[in-house]
Amino acid sequence: MNKLIENGKVGIVYSPGFGAGWYTWNQGSPEILFDSNIVKYVETQRWDELKVYVELKYPDLYTGGMDTLQVEWIPVGSQFKITEYDGSESIEYRDSDNWLTA
């Protein structure tokens, strides 16, 4: 995947606003979490360019709420998952989520 890595961290795009999940509503395209172009557009809030880019590269995505996307910088190699409630996504880290092992 084409990830944007800066200072040992990977840019992850997610949708914390209510209404529609970015990744959770498009789980067939996990690369949208990491796509370096999407990360750059979101970081600079270039929503019109993001819309054009996504329409051309990922024509089958659901893009509702795209203008509320945010970037989270996660240390390279960290394990995480995206969870969603009513369209609002959050990032859960394996190291801090009290996961248990049987």
Image: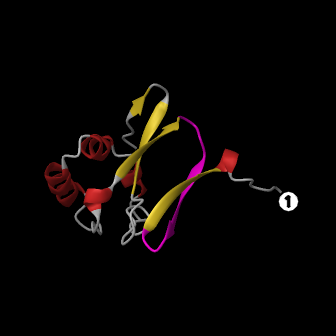
Tell me the kind of residue under disc 1. Answer: Ala
Q: Who's the residue at 41% across and 65% down the image?
A: 28
Residue in the foreground of this view, choosing between 31 and 44: 44
> Which quarter shows the N terminus?
top left
Q: Who's the residue at 29% across and 65% down the image?
A: 65
Q: Who's the residue at 58% across and 50% down the image?
A: 80
Q: Is residue 92 left or right of residue 16?
A: right
- Residue 10: percent from left, percent from top: 45, 37
| Furthest residue toward front | 17
Which residue is identified by label 1? 102
Magenta range: 76-87
- Residue 61: percent from left, percent from top: 29, 66
Residue in the foreground of this view, choosing between 64 and 27: 64
Say few, some or many: other residues with alpha carbon within 10 Å of mark 1 (under 14 / 14 to 19 / 20 or more): few
Q: Is residue 72 left or right of residue 63?
A: right
- Residue 85: percent from left, percent from top: 50, 71
Image vertical order of residue 71 relative to residue 9, above or below: below
Q: Does the magenta segment cover residue 79?
A: yes
Q: Who's the residue at 29% across and 41% down the image?
A: 43
